[in-house]
Image (cartoon, grey):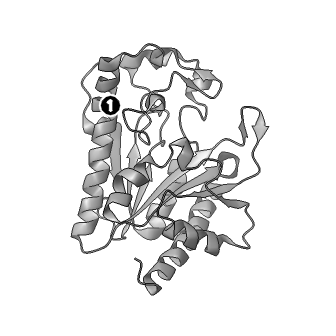
Amino acid sequence: MTATNAEDVVEVLNPAGASPVVLVCEHASSFIPPELQDLGLAKADRLSHAAWDPGALAVARRMAERLDAKLVASKVSRLVYDCNRPPSAPDAMPARSELVVVPGNAELDDAARQARADTYYHPFRKALADTIKTTAASGATPVIVTVHSFTPVYHGNPRTVEIGILHDSDTRLADGMLDAAQGSAFVVQRNEPYGPENGVTHTLKEHGLPHGYANVMLEVRNDLIVSEHQQRDMGDTICDWLFAAMIALAEEGQA
């Protein structure tokens, strides 16, 4: 595999951000490095939700702006390596994603999988860990917030949920955000359309739970964040819920 610099696979936006919130966007990009020959995919599949989370990075950028928060984002497609999965997970480099077959991932041996992890996952993991440590060193207790989007139709089945607020064993931040979201114009649900049983909370388990940092994963239906206006409004809405949840935690002495 062609040598790749860390800055080619992960970026830290607003690295001097003063907020305790560290934003994460693991599926920010649909980019496939040239040496991987498009993973054998047709253009439509390379641009589809199978390859990335459309709109998620724009929402995360707005949140970073509003919060003055650091944002760690992957710069490669999740079909190259899904940075929300450990190297041991089969879907870290999936041979199939929903209806999309990924020829370039079909016959990866252990050495090839390790090379992918070394090239794409470990630099991302280190950048995120370092960003969290920098936040903690400033005297703030980090709060980990990951931002994702999901397709309105999955395996032919429409999804009615519009925003998912996801958590693993630490429910503190999710509980507060769900309370704040009550009465909103959106259909907001806990651990939907995915949950811990689907392996989606890896980043929370890796970077939040071991340190006791409050953490949450956000899923926004991607038809709600197509335009810049929608992306900005969604970022603001989620920030309002996050602010309320963090204030509640502080008042309860849990932050």
Mark 1, other Cα within 10 Å: few <14 / some 14–19 / many ≥20: many
Q: Is residue 51 left or right of residue 15?
A: right
Horizontal and vertical percent for residue 163?
Answer: 65, 57
Question: What residue lies at 41% left-to-right and 49% top-to-bottom?
Answer: 203
Extreme left residue here? 137
Position above or below: 105 against 135: above
The quadrant holding residue 117 is top left
Question: What residue lies at 38% left-to-right and 38% top-to-bottom?
Answer: 86
The answer to whether one can see residue 85 in this image is yes
Question: What residue lies at 40% left-to-right and 47% top-to-bottom?
Answer: 73
The quadrant the C terminus occupies is bottom left
Q: Amino acid at mark 1?
A: Ala
Position above or below: 65 against 7: below
Between residue 3 and residue 188, name the one nearer to us: 188
The answer to whether one can see residue 14 in this image is no
Horizontal and vertical percent for residue 125?
Answer: 31, 45
The quadrant holding residue 138 is bottom left
Horizontal and vertical percent for residue 184?
Answer: 72, 70
Question: What residue lies at 26% left-to-right and 46% top-to-bottom?
Answer: 126
The quadrant the N terminus occupies is top left
Q: Which residue is mark 1?
A: 117
Q: Is residue 159 left or right of residue 46?
A: right
Q: Determine the secondary structure under disc 1.
A: helix
